[in-house]
Each structure stands twice: as C-alpha cells, then as structure tokens.
C-alpha cells in the first residue's frame, strides 16, 4: 500500500475539471433534501386552511388531523423506504385489514388472550410481506404486478373468510377478552399534552419516522437501500446483497402494516372485512409527495411523514372549511401531480448531467 | 511468489489470477471457449477484441458475476469457483466497470464506501462513521488529483473522468491486488484518457496486477505487458509485448485477415 501511495504522489497530479464542481447551484442543494418541496407544500396547505377554516385552528381539530396523518403515515414510512429501494407494495392497504382480521378472529373465535391474536396478526403480516418479496425475487416480475396479485387475493380472502368464520362482514367485539387492556395501552391509548388530546398512534408515527430516517441515513443497510433502488446491478457488483435487502424492505412494510392494524383494532375493537382498498395508493401518494422518486434511489422517511401530514390536514381541513368532502381526492391528486412533475425535473436534470459528461 | 524470488529468477512470479481453457455457454450460444490468461503482480494484461468478442463475459467470470462452465480458474494457484463478486473481492480481485458501478444519485463518499462501509458503535447504535468516510474519501481523491468542493454532492454530477478516478481510487483503497478495468478510456476524450492511462501505469508500478480491457490498441500498447486478442469467444492472439510490435497488434485488433480483404475491396471500389 505504501509503495502505491508513493507512486500516486509521484504521478503528476492532473486537474480533472476542478472548476466544474466548485460551483454549488441552488438546484443541487435542493436535490440533497428531497423533502424540501413537501415542506413548502405542507406550509401552504396549513396557511390556506388556517385562513379559511376557523375550526382548523382549534386544538381538538389537531388531535383528529394528527391521528389521520399517523394512520396513513406509519405504513407510508415503510412504503417510502421500499420505494427508495426501487419497489412497490400495492397489497399494503388491504394487508392492514388482513392482519387486523387475523388478530381479531384468532383471539375471539378461539377464545384466546388478545396477545395471541396480536402475534397471529404479526405472523400473517410478515408472511404476506415475505411472499411478496420472495415472489419478486424468484419471478423477476415488476413488483407492481406481484403485489397487485397479492392485493386482489387478500381482498378476496378477507371478505370470504370473515364471512365463513363470523357469518358477517365484520369481526366480533374483542374488548372483553383477556389482555385487551394491556394491548390497548400500547396500541390505542389516548392522553392530553398542552391542551391537545393525542392518540398514541401519533407518537408511534414519529418513532417510525425517526427509525426510518436513522436506518436510511446512518446505517449500512440504509446505504444499501439507496444503492439497490438507484442501480441494482451496480450495487450487486460491489457486493450489496440485493435480494436480501429487497425482502427485508418488504418485511419492514409488513411490520408497519401489522402495527397499523393493531392500532386500528384496539381503537375500534372490531374490524370491517371489506376495508383497505385504496389505502395502498395513499401510502404511495404520501411517499411521492414527500419527494420519493417512483423509480427508486431517492427520497426520505421524513418526506413521507410530511406527505402523510399534508393528507391529514387536507382531509379534515376540507371538513372544517365546510366544503364538500369529495374535493379531498381532487386536492390530493393535484398535490401528487405537482410533486410528480417536480420529481421528473430532478431526474431529468441528473440524467442530463450524466449524459453530458 | 516467495519461492520464485528465493530461486532468484528475477521478476517472474506465480500469477495471481490464472485462467486455463475457460469456457462459458449461455444456452446454445458459446460465449467463450478455451481462453487462457494470467496476470502477475506489477503487470498489465490487455484483453482486446471487437464488440461481441467475449471480453465482457470474460471479466464477469474473473470478478465473480458469472461462473465458468469449463476450464479452471486459479487464484494464487488454487482453483476457485466464485459465487458472487464478494468472493472475488475478498481475494483482492476488483472490477471497475464501464458504467463504473456507481449510483448517480448517491453522494461521492457513499459511493466510495458502498458495500464496504465503515461502521462505529455497538448494538442498536451501530452506525455509519460518516465523518471518517468523508475524510478518507476526500483524501484518497486528492491523492488522485481530484479536489471536490463538496464530498456530499451526488456522483451523477461529476464528469466521466472524475467518476473514473473515484472508481479507481476506491478499488485501490480497498486493497485490490488485481484491478480489472473495463473499457476505462472508451467514453473519454484524449486528455482524460491520458489521465486514466497514467493511473494504470501507477497501479502497475505499485505492484497491482491490472487487467485492461480495451477496444483501442494504441491505448493498450502504451501500458500493456501482455496482450490477448479475443475473437468470437476464442483467443486469436496471445503474446507478450516484446514479441509484438504495435503494427501487428493493430492489425489483429482491426480484424486481421478480414481487414486485408476489406482493403482490397475498397481499393477496387475506389478505382471503379
């Protein structure tokens, strides 16, 4: 090694385009913080509803808005990290209900402690996630198709099996079962901070964002996730275990799916078997609004959190402003469009630079 | 290696990488057959050939992306059958690809350490030592003459020449014994090609074995010690530098006999 260093020092040091890189453009600073755009969007949405809807300013409104944001935001964090790794999960929305149904029916129909149901829900969520990841690796099909298939299958199973086991479209109330109180304390307790009544889901949401951010920016696995999504072949060539990373990402989505399911179950005590479809697209929407590139390799967990917050504020802001609820999807779609166009600009700019050089 | 030196046979050492009669099939298609190649420390072996000659398949075998179907692959005299590039990396065989195996959207230092990140702390607090990696990446690039105002900038923002040097600096830093350079000068202008050739020479002088894949006999001849010309998956020419004048190498590279007949044809056409 030392001889090499000497050789390097002796070799005449060439100047390879020093001037090009010493210039820092605003654009490239922007590129480094994918969530900046969504932050601007969140401030704008906040300002609009703050001005238009007096009810939006009340602390009670914030407990609802933050709860809505959290229920979308917990799976959205994992979906964003998965998208950074270059894949989709369309089954996540329905899988939340599969996991909740499994937990509820396992406890009630077998007259068990709810914690056994909680474990069953986790096992099912991770199994679904593993099957998604494994099918993706084995078939080499786009994850869009693989998870669309599991999405439809789960939707069918959810309704059909619930009907067989309960004779209804919903599960039985589990609040009288053993272990309910302790499970509710973890997944669905509520408390008051500074005049705002908060559901514990909000704290869990922040925790998931923090963990996601830590993993992405400060761990080896995080480095690998960006690499796998940015250029899987290149990542493989330097020794990144691409298949393991992708399956791991699906398992992470599975974990947040289970967590969301448990919050849902212990907040309402019953589960409706037909719910879930559509949510998977909202998770993806939150990730993209938060700055994730649909093609992978770029984005942040915090961006997905902001994307979810924008959704929560818009959903309830429209109610507080006294508008027709149907405008919600219009506004969410509009923000998605703006975010997608911004993302496309980013990618084109980087593509141009690579092609030029 | 030690024994050879003890016998006092001069610079002749055992090869680090040796291929004997390597073959590779993809279904019915024979991509390579009967290819021999050896690389010693401090030696540049050049592999030349037209598009589709099997150069890329050959280096993919050497660096562990493909496994060979026939023949034997020896590292330090021991037969190996790599399952992944990691196996090759562990033995110090590192490839620098045409696309440079870089992630355009990731920062320079993250690319530099990708797959071999430095971590600190234990248990749940085990984390990337970002400061250390930034400092090392910056130092290593400075040694190569690249001074970046910002080590955090995405690699996609660098010029092709800069990316090339990042890739080579990375390979050398991670203790490569054999450096495989796939068409490192293909996309570069004259000045930047010169820079890359200088680093090939520097790596060779520092005792690394270099496998230099190229289209360009003029570039190869500037740094090469041994030349292998591939054609349709087979070795057409295998010769040390001292037995091979540049004209002959260029002749083989340009298509050999085919070129002569093409020359005849074109002459007739121009007369007509």
Image (cartoon, coloured by chain):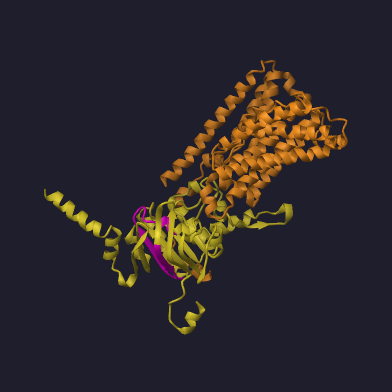
Q: Tell me, by letter, which chain the rendering colours orange.
A: A
Work out whether residue A72 can be spotted.
yes
| The quadrant where residue B37 appears | bottom left
Query: Which stretch is magenta?
Result: B34-58
Q: x, y (%) of residue A23?
A: 49, 46
A22 relative position to B127: left or right? left
Q: Is residue B195 magenta?
A: no
Q: Tell me, by letter, which chain the rendering colours yellow.
A: B
Q: Is residue B38 magenta?
A: yes
Q: x, y (%) of residue A54?
A: 73, 19
B179 relative position to A258: left or right? left
Seen from the viewer's position, the closer of residues A101 and A184 is: A101
A18 relative position to B225: left or right? right
* A207 w.r.t. B244: above or below: above
Work out whether residue A11 can be spotted.
no
| The quadrant where residue A11 appears | bottom left
Residue found at x 54% / y 51%: A235
Seen from the viewer's position, the closer of residues A151 and A290 is: A151
Seen from the viewer's position, the closer of residues B176 and A107 is: A107
Q: Residue furthest bottom?
A: B7
Residue found at x 61% / y 31%: A285
Q: x, y (%) of residue A141?
A: 54, 40
Seen from the viewer's position, the closer of residues B249 and A148 is: A148
Q: x, y (%) of residue A32?
A: 57, 42
Residue found at x 81% / y 27%: A172
* A29 w.r.t. A160: above or below: below
């Amino acid at each position: 090694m030392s001889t090499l260093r000497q050789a390097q020092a002796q070799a005449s040091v060439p100047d390879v385009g020093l001037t090009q890189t010493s210039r820092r453009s605003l654009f490239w600073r922007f590129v480094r913080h994918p969530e900046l755009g969504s932050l601007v969007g969140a401030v704008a949405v906040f300002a609009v509803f703050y001005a238009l809807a007096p009810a939006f300013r009340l602390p009670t409104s914030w407990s609802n808005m933050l709860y809505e944001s959290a229920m979308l935001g917990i799976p959205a964090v994992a979906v964003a990290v998965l998208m950074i790794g270059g894949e989709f999960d369309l089954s996540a929305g329905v899988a939340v209900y599969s996991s909740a149904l499994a937990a509820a029916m396992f406890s009630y129909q077998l007259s068990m402690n709810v914690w056994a149901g909680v474990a069953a829900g986790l096992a099912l969520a991770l199994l679904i996630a593993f099957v998604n990841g494994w099918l993706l690796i084995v078939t080499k099909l786009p994850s869009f198709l693989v998870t669309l298939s599991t999405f439809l299958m789960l939707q069918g199973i959810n309704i059909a099996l619930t009907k067989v086991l309960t004779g209804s479209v919903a599960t039985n109330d589990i609040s009288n079962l053993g272990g309910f109180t302790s499970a509710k304390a973890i997944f669905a307790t509520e408390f008051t901070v500074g005049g705002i009544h908060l559901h514990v889901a909000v704290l869990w949401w922040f925790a998931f964002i923090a963990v996601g951010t830590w993993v992405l920016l400060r761990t080896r696995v995080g480095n690998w996730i960006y690499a796998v999504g940015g250029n899987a072949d290149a990542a493989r060539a330097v020794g990144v275990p691409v298949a393991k990373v992708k399956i791991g990402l699906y398992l992470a989505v599975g974990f947040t799916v289970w967590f969301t399911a448990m919050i849902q179950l212990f907040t309402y005590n019953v589960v409706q078997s037909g719910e879930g479809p559509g949510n998977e697209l909202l998770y993806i929407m939150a990730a993209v609004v938060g700055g994730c590139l649909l093609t992978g390799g770029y984005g942040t967990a915090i961006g997905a959190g902001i994307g979810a917050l924008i959704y929560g504020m818009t959903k309830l802001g429209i109610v507080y402003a006294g508008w027709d609820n149907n405008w919600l999807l219009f506004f969410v779609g509009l923000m998605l469009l703006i975010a997608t166009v911004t993302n496309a600009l980013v990618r084109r700019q980087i593509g141009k630079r690579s092609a030029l050089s | 290696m030690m024994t050879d030196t003890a016998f006092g046979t001069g610079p002749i050492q055992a090869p680090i990488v040796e291929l004997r009669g390597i073959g590779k099939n993809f279904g019915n298609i024979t991509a390579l057959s009967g290819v021999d190649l050896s690389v010693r420390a401090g030696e540049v072996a050049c592999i030349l050939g037209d598009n589709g000659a099997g150069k890329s398949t050959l280096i993919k075998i050497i660096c562990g992306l493909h496994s060979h179907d026939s023949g034997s692959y020896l590292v330090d005299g021991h037969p190996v059958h790599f399952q992944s590039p990691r196996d090759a990396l562990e033995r110090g065989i590192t490839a620098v690809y045409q696309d440079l195996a870089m992630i355009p959207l990731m920062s320079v230092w993250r690319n530099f350490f990708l797959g071999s990140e430095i971590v600190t702390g234990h248990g749940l607090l085990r984390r990337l030592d970002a400061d250390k990696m930034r400092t090392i990446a910056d130092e290593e690039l400075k040694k190569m003459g690249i001074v970046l105002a910002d080590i955090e900038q995405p690699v996609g923002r660098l010029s092709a020449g800069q990316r090339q040097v990042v890739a080579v600096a990375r390979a050398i830093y991670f203790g490569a014994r054999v450096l495989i350079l796939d068409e490192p000068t293909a996309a570069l202008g004259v000045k930047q090609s010169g820079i890359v050739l200088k680093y090939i020479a520097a790596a060779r002088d520092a005792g690394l074995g270099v496998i230099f894949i190229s289209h360009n006999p003029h570039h190869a001849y500037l740094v090469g010690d041994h030349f292998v010309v591939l054609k349709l998956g087979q070795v057409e020419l295998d010769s040390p530098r001292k037995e091979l004048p540049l004209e002959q190498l260029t002749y083989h590279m340009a298509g050999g006999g085919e070129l002569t007949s093409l020359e005849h044809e074109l002459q007739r056409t121009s007369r007509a």
